[in-house]
Amino acid sequence: MKRDRWNSKLGFLLAAIGSAVGLGNIWRFPYTAVENGGGAFLLPYFFAIITAGIPILILEYTIGKTYRGGAPVSLARMNKKFEWLGWFQVMVAFVITVYYVAVIVWVVSYVGFAANQSWGADPTGFFLEYLGISASALELGGIQMNLVGPFIGIWVVTAFVMYRGISKGIEIACKIALPALLILTAILVIRGITLPGAVDGINYLFEPKWDRILDSSVWVAAYGQVFFSLSIAFAIMIAYSSYLPKDTDVVNSAFITATANHGFELFAGIGVFSILGHMAYTQGVGVEEVAAGGVGLAFMVFPAAINSLPAMNGFIGVCFFGALLFAGFTSLISIIQAVISGIADKFELPQKKATTIVIVPAFLISMLFITGAGLNILDIVDAFINNIGVAGAGLIEVFLIGWFFNLETLRKEANQFSNFSIGKWWIYALKIVTVVVLGFMVISNTLGYVKNGYGGYASIDVAVFGWGSILICIVVAIILTAMKGKEGYTDLSKHNKEVE
């Protein structure tokens, strides 16, 4: 069966950058930086990019391009005993898919709300009422009918792109979405830096607090931001790179992807905090009193900041939520493709059939997140899947491949078609630095959740949706690993003869 390919290296890079540049770049990075030393955070942040972000990107690009399959098949071709890890990563991606859709549904609605500031003078109250928030994660409260329209719309558009495949679907979508995202973000930045009080917001973001530089939690936060931001360790980049021609320069591609992604984080941060600085200025309070991260920044704080603008409120609001929409959508299609590639490659299914197998259950399960309990469930699942699932998958990946596979063969493969070669530092960064930092992150996060629960939620809520989501990923990964695939799916030489 002939395997789809990217039309060009540019198409691949736009898709990879689109995957990396997601909601977290806009609403997670600026607040994470502020909370961890401001400008001083940039030192461990750039160190983490060099020692973990780029090395893992090179690793995953090389694995995908060399072994020519989604994460489960590529890892199985490296060592049959590694296949289960690929399926665990795929299941993590599947879980992220079903709740990521819900956030994009909210964003779509808010593009409309922003046009005339429908949220009124109390954006926080409006958001909670809009979602019909129930008291707990187990109190579903029924499907919120106001979310059904955008929910179905997002799934229809997503399915359309996925059914068209890599070159005719994802690549074209990213070629449209990435320039649009950049233009909308540039408008936000230009408008933001011209506002009274903007300098206060930017200073608050970048002013270095050097006393925090020796705090281990700051370094862990830096590695965490780099790790989650680049879409590494949950099957995406292995899947994407598996559609590359054999002679692609993966080292160069990894540096371009990381530079574009992290550059966008800094750029978006300037836009967000300049507008928050203006909001603080109009209220006569410090920026720290209005700053927030995550869902709170996007749907509660930023609408209030839009209200405070002297002019062009609706236009700037549409730009902000439009940017979130494009960033979120390019990430969503990459996450789903990671799952589709895993299924298609092991069972030798065409893209359309594999897409149906993935999207139908994802659609049904994601309905859980448009109930009254949706925000509570999302908060719990997101915390556990990211801090234990993604980080744990990354730790196991670099540990198994670093210590039980000859990394030197992958280094030579990466260098074969590269303009500049990676040295031995790459091996040591993966085998030692990344293993130690990720190991510390996973252990501390896991112990923290065991001892303290999460977010003040009832222990039963955390058990069902937090630990339960991790358990489901493990169990389904074991089942998929045990299932019989098409004969010879681990035989790379047989596969290469079929596709060349």
Image: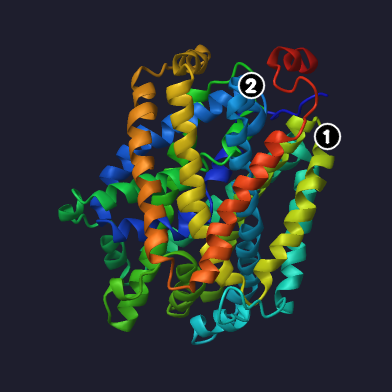
For mark 2, does the 10 Å Cα neighbourhood hold few (<14), some (14 to 19), or many (20 or more) residues? Answer: many
What is the quadrant of residue 223 in the picture? Answer: top left
Residue type at mark 2 is: Arg
Q: Is residue 387 left or right of residue 471?
A: left
**What is the quadrant of the N terminus in the image?**
top right
**What is the quadrant of the C terminus in the image?**
top right
Residue at 83% across, 41% down: 352
Residue 313 in the image: state x and y as whole percent: 51, 75
Could you tell me if residue 64 is visible in this image?
no
Residue at 47% across, 40% down: 260
For mark 1, does the 10 Å Cα neighbourhood hold few (<14), some (14 to 19), or many (20 or more) residues? Answer: some
Q: What residue is disc 1 on? A: 350
Q: What residue is disc 2 on? A: 77
Against 125, residue 32 (above or below) is above
Residue 73 in the image: state x and y as whole percent: 67, 28
Against 283, residue 256 (above or below) is above
Q: Nearer the viewer, mark 1 or mark 2?
A: 2
Q: Is residue 439 left or right of residue 163?
A: left
Earlier residue among tags 1 and 2: 2
What is the quadrant of residue 248 in the picture? Answer: top right
Residue 204 in the image: state x and y as whole percent: 27, 63
Residue type at mark 1 is: Pro
Instruction: In this rendered view, identify the residue nearer to me: 279 or 369.
Output: 369
